[in-house]
Image (cartoon, grey):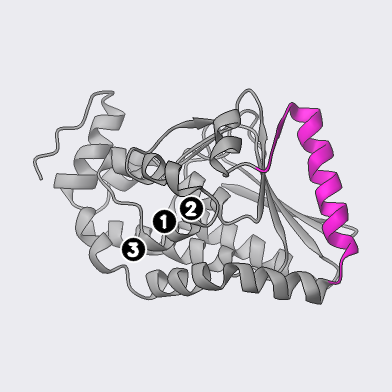
């Protein structure tokens, strides 16, 4: 994955690309963390923007062929990387916007969730925490973050049924803050970044810390200990789910 970090006035933009689907490996997630932390540490930066450099795609999550090639121990290392990425990005001090101009699935959805604001391109932007479809429960820390924006009446559809939400549904479910065509979303990004940059950085960061306090605590605990989540990385769960995905069939779970 190629990750570019650009600084312009008061805004830092993390632009990532790995055509065609921005599929993630452990090294990719570490690169994303490094770029975001550099943006957060930049003395002039007041707002961080995350966006994909692949047209019509945000990120389709972990690379299934890559994960299937790993031992269970190595898979645990990869999901430790997911936990570390989630924890690091929800701990960014500065306000963070994500531009969703294509699918954000599973690990890609988790990446998008770490932002404080999300703008969706109306035709191609969509999101799904699709882990249950490939034999994984959504981690408690991630559920807590989802629940902080998704109304309770929709929460089960998102975390149990792995609802695949287009841009208008994402807005209804609370996962999108803006929906529009490419030009409209760019205007929203610029307007929102300008509004945030005009505020006192100390006030914004303190307010963000208050809003994120509970999620940050849960993310820290998940990064420290994957707990029971690690028991699902074997062939009966994740292995079967990913094999079914690459073979284009329905998974057959026996447990």
Asked whether residue 33 is in view, the answer is: yes
Helix, strand or loop under label 2: helix
Label 3 to label 2, Cα distance in Å?
A: 24 Å
Q: Tell me the distance, in whole angstroms, between the alpha carbons under discs 1 and 3.
A: 21 Å
Local secondary structure at mark 3 = helix
Looking at the picture, how far across and down is residue 108, in whole percent?
50, 45
Comparing 205 with 81, the one in front is 205
| Helix, strand or loop: magenta stretch | helix
Query: Which stretch is magenta?
Result: 177-200
Q: Residue 213: horizontal and vertical position, in percent? A: 56, 73
Of 140 and 253, nearer the camera is 140
**Residue at 65 percent of width and 62 percent of height:** 36
Q: Position of residue 100 (x, y in %)?
A: 63, 38
Residue at 79 percent across and 74 percent down: it is 203
The residue lying at 80 percent from left, 37 percent from top is: 186
State the residue position of label 3: 77
Q: Residues within 10 Å of mark 3 (few under 14, many from 20)?
A: some
In the rendering, at what x and y percent does residue 51 appear?
67, 44
Q: Residue furthest left?
A: 254
Up-down relation of residue 65 to residue 208 (above or below): above
Above/below status of 183 relative to 227: above
- Which residue position is annotated with label 1? 143
Cβ–Cβ below 8 Å for labels 2 and 1?
yes
Asked if residue 194 is among those painted magenta in the image, a careful observer would answer yes
Instruction: Give me the C-alpha separation between circle 2 and circle 1.
Output: 5 Å
Residue occupied by mark 2: 146
Dot 1 or dot 3, earlier in sequence: 3
- Compared to residue 191, the image places residue 179 above or below, namely above
Compared across the picture, whether 158 is left or right of 90 comes to: left
């Amino acid at each position: 994955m190629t990750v570019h970090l650009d600084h312009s006035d008061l805004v830092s933009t993390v632009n990532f690309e790995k055509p065609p689907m921005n599929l993630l490996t452990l090294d990719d997630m570490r690169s994303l963390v490094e770029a975001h932390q550099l943006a957060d540490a930049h003395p002039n930066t007041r707002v961080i923007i995350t966006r994909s450099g692949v047209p019509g795609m945000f990120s389709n999550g972990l690379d299934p062929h890559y994960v299937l090639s790993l031992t269970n121990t190595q898979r645990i290392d990869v999901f430790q990387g997911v936990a570390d990425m989630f924890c690091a990005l929800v701990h960014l001090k500065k306000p963070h916007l994500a531009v969703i101009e294509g699918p954000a699935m599973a690990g890609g959805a988790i990446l998008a969730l770490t932002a404080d604001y999300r703008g969706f391109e109306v035709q191609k932007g969509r999101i799904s925490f699709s882990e249950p479809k490939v034999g994984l429960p959504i981690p408690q820390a991630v559920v807590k973050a989802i629940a902080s924006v998704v109304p309770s009446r929709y929460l089960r559809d998102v975390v149990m049924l792995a609802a695949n939400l287009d841009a208008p549904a994402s807005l209804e479910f609370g996962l999108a803050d803006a929906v529009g065509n490419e030009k409209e979303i760019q205007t929203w990004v610029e307007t929102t970044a300008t509004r945030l940059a005009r505020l006192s950085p100390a006030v914004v960061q303190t307010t963000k810390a208050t809003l994120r306090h509970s999620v940050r605590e849960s993310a820290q605990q998940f990064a420290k200990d994957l707990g029971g989540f690690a028991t699902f990385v074997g062939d009966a769960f994740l292995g079967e789910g990913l094999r079914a995905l690459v073979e284009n069939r329905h998974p057959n779970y026996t447990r």
